[in-house]
Image: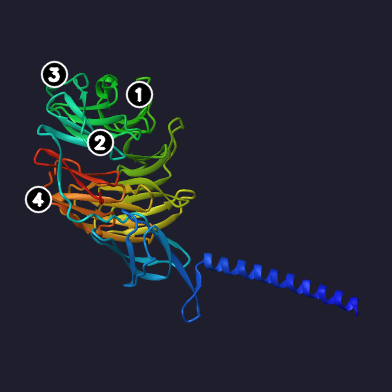
Amino acid sequence: MNFEKIKRLRHLKVIISEAIMVLVVIATVIILALVVSGYWVNSDFKVERQGMLQISSTPTGASVIIDNETSWLQRTNTSKVLTGGEHEVILTKEGYDTWSKTVDISEGLLYRLHYPRLFILNRTPEKYYYLPEATFAAVSPDYDLLLVANNTTSWQLINLIEDEPKPRIIDVSNLFRSSGSTNGLFDGSIVRADWDHDEVHVLLEVNMGSSVEWALLDVREPQRSINLSYEFGSEFSDVQIFDNSASNLLAIQNGNLHRIDVPNRSLSAVLVENVVDYDINNGEIVYVVEQHVDSSLPSYGIGLTKIGDKAKMPILEFTEPVMATQTKFYDNQFLVVSHGNTITLYDKANLNEAAEYILSFNPSSIKAGHHGEFIIVSSEAQLATIDMESSSVYEWVMENSSYQWLNHDMLYDVSGGELFVYDYDGLNRRNLSNNVSDHFPVTITRDKWLYYFSDDYLTREWLIEH
């Protein structure tokens, strides 16, 4: 027996086996890299690049039909590899209505559909609480609390997640100084109400007839509330909450931007002069100033600053009035500017123009989506949505000019008592109810209940099977 020959053969087998293993590992890595990059082998055994669709829904477990094809395994809260191009996506669930959208899949990229909402059919309105004297209501940021004002100084705070309502009385008798709030009566008109993120304070703009008063209402300890107009002896043209707890506010006085330190009851020196518009995003202020430089015609500058920073020169300039906000989409941060009928996105890191969209109208308001996935602008009932996922623009018109946000991704309006809801892009318009007051907010709480006012009642409907 030739032992040397046997050893050489064994060594050769080991080398070949190891080489094959290395090749398999390399091939596996290459295949995985190609798959991650969107490459796939189709049914004709041809390599093509694809994209991925990630689908979620409320409620979960809806059937997904893509291009008229479905399978029993295809449900929401999953991902699907698709070829590049347009695909029709339909979501269905027994006992619920249907949701659909045509999506444009880009090769090698992820398209997220996280917002679809299906509404249960055959809902029954339930009278939740009698509020015959209500004049105004404001819903908290997490949609759990409802502040209800009336013509007296005893307002109510309702926790919407309770099966049986147990309202708290909020005494505002010492909050407003004008004559209308004496003797237990309140004859002011609330123009605006903004909650802080912590849901402890509500910033109120109130028309008291001969004057406008700004007040910060503490719903937990009403005696700690502050009438800002009287506290600082100032006429503010605008006030906004700066931080989560409303410890700091921003206010415009005589065209100049100031900070209000609420705990210390102090008004700062001027932060920025000649401010005509501003917005707050993650502790940073984007502002628009009107300036006159070597000309009698005004120009408009856009700048960024933080509380405590020294005044900075505008970073962008325009010859026409503008509005500006900020947004973050994935890891990219953008400065969004509306000027005339044009929306321009600038890369915040270098101020290079990232995208430009031409609309058929001149917007009067601008808002970035909660997750950065869209930008919506409007002028009365006319709206346009920039879908950041697909870089598409949708223009559409609502039933009337008084639209509101139902949650972070859906809008609604009420026309002739009929409640219509829309996705943020104007699609999937649905009529939910037919006896809804257009003077009060509509909201969805904990994805379980739809609340609205109807015939002096706060009314709710179950949105899920129970």
Identity of the amino acid at label 4?
Gly
Q: Residue at x 78, y 75 (%)?
A: 13
Residue 108 in picture, x, y percent from top left: 48, 66
Q: CA distance from mark 3 to mark 4?
A: 36 Å
- Numbered circle sitting on residue 262: 1
Quick one: label 2 or label 3, which is nearer the N terminus?
Answer: 2
Vertical order, 315 against 147 (above or below): below
Label 4 element class: loop
Residue 268 in picture, x, y percent from top left: 38, 24
Q: Which residue is mark 3?
A: 182
Quick one: label 4 or label 2, which is nearer the N terminus?
Answer: 2
Vertical order, 176 against 375 (above or below): above
Query: How is colour applied across the structure in the image?
Result: rainbow
Residue density around tag 1, few if under 14, some if 14–19, many if 20 or more, within 10 Å: some
Identity of the amino acid at label 1?
Val
Q: Which residue is mark 4?
A: 416
Depth check: give the residue in front, 167 or 284: 167
Q: CA distance from mark 4 to mark 2?
A: 30 Å
Quadrant of the rendering where the N terminus is positioned: bottom right
Depth check: give the residue in front, 285 or 74: 74
Vertical order, 377 against 296 (above or below): below
Mark yes or no: residue 258 visible. no
Identity of the amino acid at label 3?
Thr
